[in-house]
Image (tube, helix red, strand yellow):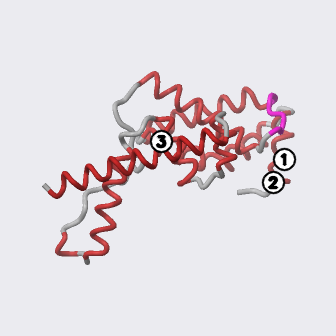
Amino acid sequence: MKDVNEMTIYIQRAKAGDIQAFTAIVTNYQRMIFTIILKIVGNREDAEDITQEVFIKIFKSLRKFRGESSFSTWIYRIAYNTTLSELRKKKPAFYSIDENSSAVNDADTMDSDYETKEIKLQYLNESLKKLSPDELFLVTLYYSQEQSIEEVSKISNLSVSNVKVKLHRIRKKLAVEINLLMQNEDK
């Protein structure tokens, strides 16, 4: 990722209509945006389409960026709103946090610590699929993208206390789901 001063120059040049500067912005942020969208929608094709839509929206509204928040926060907000909009249109039943989630390998070929971690990860992935898109987006921003509560608040347009409450409720919801899966496994 380019340094802040260099990105500021690209942003100013892109606002003035410099396509090459906008290309540099896309290059700098496309992986970050694509990754988070992919975690929400769970489908590479849809994630690519939504990412492209995000950058079209960024291009069209770049002149509106006033710098009141960081540029990455502004981009995340556009990605957040666009992703949720697209998901509302499609209304799929479940969303995957990890397109590479897989079944646990044969227990004979791994030691018990590794097996336990794999099972817990599998339970977590299954539980994450049951979250709503906005819950999954909050969890992904905070835990996977390591955004602060304040940044998540700006991106999601929720108050800091509301983000904290929602994350707390999501953790409790995940704990209940994981416990149910573990109980069903014991039966």
At 41% from the left and 24% from the top, the residue drawn is 90
Image-based side of 33 in relation to 49, left or right: right
Judging from the image, what secondary structure is the residue with disc 1 in?
Answer: helix
| Residues at circles 2 and 1 in contact by the CB criterion of under 8 Å | yes
Give the extent of the magenta segment.
63-68
Q: For the point 31% across and 54% down, which residue is it? A: 123
Q: According to the image, label 3 marks what residue?
A: 136
Q: Tag 3 or tag 2, which sits nearer the N-term?
A: 2
Residue 63, how many percent across, how many down? 81, 29
Q: Mark 3 vs mark 1: which is more N-terminal?
A: 1
Please name the residue that numbered disc 2 is placed on. Answer: 4
Q: Quadrant of the C terminus?
A: bottom left
Identify the secondary structure beneath mark 3: helix
- Observer-side mark, 3 or 1, equals 3
Considering depth in this image, is 65 or 160 the residue closer to the camera? 160
Camera-side mark, 2 or 3 = 3
Check disc 1: other Cα within 10 Å, few if <14, some if 14-19, many if 20+.
Answer: some
